[in-house]
Structure formats: C-alpha cells, structure tokens
Image (cartoon, rainbow, N blue to C red):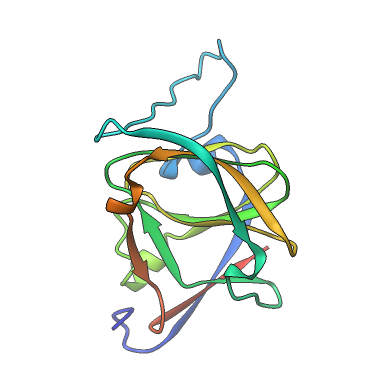
Amino acid sequence: MGPEMGEARVVTVRSEPLTAEAWAPFGALPVDEGDPGDRVQIEFEWADPHVNYISHHYDEVERTERGARCERLYRHATHTQTLMPLDCESIVAVAPAGADLTTSAGLDTIRAFRLRPLDCFVLARGTWHWGPFPIEPGTVRLLNLQGRRYTDDNAHVDLTPGATVEVVL
C-alpha cells in the first residue's frame, strides 16, 4: 500500500552536483586512464554487454514548480549500467540497491544529481534509478552501456499512491 505510516507522504529530494564522493553509494565515476583512482568495474552476469544510444523526453515525467515528480524507480540485478548525457543538462534520482522503497526509511535514501553533458556515471548492480530526464523541454540523448537482455532484468517499484517524491532542481 505504500509507506508504512499509512498515509500519503511527500518527500523532497534536492539535486546536487555529481561528484565521486556523493555518487559512491550508487556506483562509480570513470576517471582518466592512468589515474591512481581508476577502480571502476563493470559487471555482466549474463555476459551480454551492449552499448547504444537511448533518450528520455521532458514530458515523460510530471513536472512541478520546482522540478519533477518521481513515481517509479528501476534496477538491474545482473549488470552494471553506464550512462552519459550527451547534449543537455539532466537529472537522475537514485537509491542504494538494498533500499526498501516501500518504506519511509527507504524513501529517505533517495538522492538526486544534476548532470551536465558528458557527465558519465556507472550504476552499481541493483542500484535503483530514475532518469536521467532533461531539465528543460526537449530530449536528452544518452550513451548507454548495459546488458542486452535488460528487459529480463528490469525490476521496478512504484512510489505512488503511498508517496510522492519531488526531485527539486
């Protein structure tokens, strides 16, 4: 039915800049070759890595005065996913793999990041995610590296009607 408190809850998640430290609970950020911090690992349990372009449109999500409404998050248990917005600023919301997003405590783990073009990030296996969605009207084109059979491993959780998560820009 939603959060255990028994009534609708509004959770406000303010976006923050994408940094390696802030992103660490959700995955990793690629670094330059030769960087001593180059420890990014990608995983494909089904040995099916695939790279392509995908896009998300501004009107795919409900907009609010301060940002957008996040109603559902997705995750992939069998593979990491690497995304990079190519052409416009966008926003992504995430929660740790172990978060139970049907509870109040789980909703409190959701964070949001404001992305610039060419900000590349890796989602750890099982990390809940929403977006990236463009900040302004239009479409964000994304470089996408994930398992080819992602549709067979694309769990989701609906946050409404028990909760409304507003991602603030």
The relative height of residue 26 versus residue 28 in the rendered view (above or below) is below
User: Between 164 and 135, which is closer to the camera in this rendering?
Assistant: 135
User: In this orientation, does residue 153 appear?
Assistant: no
Q: Position of residue 124 (x, y in %)?
A: 38, 40
In the image, taking residue 145 as reference, residue 151 lies left or right, namely left
- Figure quadrant of residue 95: bottom left
- Figure quadrant of residue 109: bottom left
Q: Quadrant of the C terminus?
A: bottom right
Which residue appears at 24% of the width and 35% of the height? 46
Q: Quadrant of the N terminus?
A: bottom left
Which residue appears at 42% of the width and 62% of the height? 73
Q: Position of residue 56 (x, y in %)?
A: 59, 57
- Figure quadrant of residue 4: bottom left
The relative height of residue 37 versus residue 98 in the rendered view (above or below) is above
User: For the view shown, which residue lies furthest in the top direction?
Assistant: 34
User: For the view shown, which residue lies furthest in the bottom direction?
Assistant: 7
In the image, taking residue 117 as reference, residue 24 lies left or right, namely left
The relative height of residue 154 versus residue 26 in the rendered view (above or below) is below
User: In this orientation, does residue 49 appear?
Assistant: yes
Q: Count up the numbered dots.
A: 0
Which residue appears at 73% of the width and 49% of the height? 88
User: Between 111 and 92, which is closer to the camera in this rendering?
Assistant: 92
Q: Position of residue 161 (x, y in %)?
A: 40, 84
Q: Position of residue 59 (x, y in %)?
A: 64, 70
Which residue appears at 57% of the width and 23% of the height? 31
